[in-house]
Amino acid sequence: MSTPTRSPESDIHHSRMDDLSGIVPSPVRPTSDRPLLLIGLGAVAVWLVLWQVVGLHMVVGLVVGYLAFLLVSYLYYRAAGGQRVGLDIVVRWLVYAAFVCAVVPLISMLWTVIGQGLPLAFEWFFISTDMKGITGTHDQAYAAGEGPLVGGAGHAIIGTLIVTGLATVISVPIGMFTAIYLVEYGGKNALARGIRFLVDVMTGIPSIVAGLFAFALFTQIFGIRDAKMGLAGAVALSVLMIPTVVRNSEEMLRIVPNELREASLALGVPKWRTIAKVVLPTAASGLASGITLAIARVIGETAPLLVAIGFAREFNWNFLEGPMNTLAVYTYWMFTKPLSPAVIEPSQERAWAAALLLVILVVALNLLARFIAKIFAPKSGR
Amino acid sequence: MTRATSSAHKPVRRPGDVVFSSLSLGSGILILLILALVAVFLIWQGMPALTAEREEISGGEGFFSYVWPLVFGTVVASLIAMVLATPVAVGIALFVSHYAPRRVGNAIGFVIDLLAAVPSVVFGMWGMAVFAKQLVPLYDWLSQNLAFIPIFDGRSATGRTLLTAAVVLAVMILPIITSVSREVFLQTPRLHEEAALALGATKWEMIRTAVLPFGAPGVIGGVMLGLGRALGETMAVAIILSPGVFTWVLTASGNNTIPAEIALNFPEAAGLRLSELIAAGLVLFVLTLAVNLFARWIVEKRSEFSGAN
């Protein structure tokens, strides 16, 4: 379309744009982003005026400015290219705004956790000591400047590693073998379909219900006095972890090419050796990354552990006896039940520091999972 | 595939095979058993509260009167979260699948995964310490100007209200809805999209006519999954909300949700109170189970539909 067409319809549509740029525009998209830039600058100006001069709340001003931007650009592009182009622009900027809506809380949250947690999180005493014998009086002394900040989350770090490790030891074999059954043995029979369905359902079990289940189970076995222990927490986490492991592993086993299985079986290798020596190694990187993600999912769980492992103030290495503590539970108790109700700052400092350690742990696990999946991925084809 | 080879001879039963296949079968059955056990134990331990005299239950009017305000709080907070999160999540999914360049899209996918990985207790602390305070002026304005609507008829000096909790829940379920939606949007048949564009559709018209109809069942499934997660979410609500008795007002403290009620009271509970909380957990379990079954059913239906395509 290098020359203007003669049809009356397109004349109506393009007359204004023709006047502006001298180019015949495509009817479905704007020819230039420059008007948008100008409108955007105008909207920013409106926002600054509303915020600084009129004195509206910053966010309210931003919303008004944004709506003004949408309206003006819609009107402009409708005049220039028709209603469809105007609508397209509006939707495009709504989609961009949706993205901003998700990023703002994430940044605010990370900013808060890092800012509040950093001073304490990497102090050696904080990661090496527990809360044994620490009371509100210590905190009051610290707040008054008469003593050091004492008490750390060492026991919680150890507890996190033990409970999550145990949960992994329980969940991975069960989850992997189930995935193997689903892919290698079950196929499409009724039992496999049923298991697949119920694993999906299990993914949706509320975490606190998993905790209640573990508590009820251990109350039956050990009696109500001794029910709260590390193992109970691990069982609760396993209920949450097994479905994730099954789903991830199943997907990974499913993409192992059938030719590999057939080649191995054709050589007379027993089926179980085929699975153990051919299928699993081929899928190893995917399996490892899936398991890492499953660990990352449960390591930050608070609710089930709150119910199942109680609250310990000191190091407890024995997961079969007595309450334990994990970073998430420690964070929760320090934040909501400060040692000294009058002086809450020291407890909050500990809570934020533990939260920062937890976030670092989770992010590291996520990155590790990506790294494993990328680096150790089987070289397929060429 | 393997059976055919052994038809001529008697199949060889190797001990390794027997052990391996029974281990696999056993694990599968164990999972069924665990799920059944969860239900059995909750019913068993919650039974005393369900059968107790009316006067013995907290509130003195029986288990049903005790639990329904909690169900109300849970459902209302989750529904608000769902309504807030869905358009934003669909927007982000479209941004990743159809607006952003591929590299940027991948990076954003990672950021969203990160949002999903943040522990809920951190969401709760952020919600209470940072976000709730920001909402106080909004609640003041609502209670001054829109008080004739019952849900806005009250204010909170701390911002620790059911509405705040619901907004934080919305942020928490964003990644779930986003990842499911992104997945189905990316599966839109390329030919449908190109056909729409070739007919002169704008990008939005292409999305409206090709991408959204194809993805709708998947998005609904994702939304239901998000709803299930919001119903069961504990720590964020337990920390943010300043709980109280049932009230229609959402901009002041009051109300509570089932998981938060359990988390707040369980550590000190004993005897019948314990059974009460476990029975409340059973109600929650049934509620989320229903939502999840519905979600799976919709997703299932979709996969049949797309398989026929």
Image (cartoon, coloured by chain):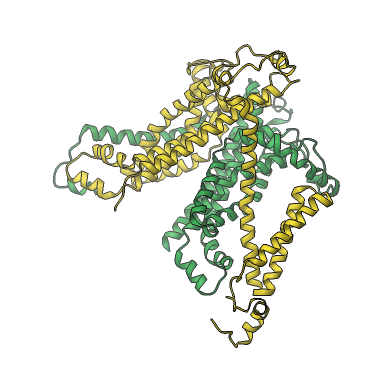
Chain colours: A yellow, B green
**Relative image position of residue A284 (x, y in whole percent):** 34, 39
Determine if residue B250 is in view: no
Query: In the rendered view, would you say A33 is above or below A97?
Result: below
Is B208 positioned to the left or the right of B160 in the image?
left
Query: In the rendered view, would you say B135 is above or below B41?
Result: below
Is B44 positioned to the left or the right of B79 in the image?
left
- Nearer to the camera, A329 or B230: A329
**Relative image position of residue A242 (x, y in whole percent):** 44, 35
Find the residue positioned furthest to the top.
Answer: A133
- Nearer to the camera, A351 or A303: A351
The residue lying at 65 percent from left, 21 percent from top is B268
Is A74 positioned to the left or the right of B189 in the image?
right
Is A268 positioned to the left or the right of B246 in the image?
left
Quadrant in which the C terminus of chain B appears: bottom left
**Relative image position of residue A2 (x, y in whole percent):** 54, 82
**Relative image position of residue A289 (x, y in whole percent):** 41, 39
Residue B100: image quadrant is bottom right
Count numbered badges in the picture: 0
Find the residue positioned furthest to the left.
Answer: B9
Determine if residue A123 is in view: yes
- Nearer to the camera, A167 or B217: A167
The residue lying at 18 percent from left, 47 percent from top is B5
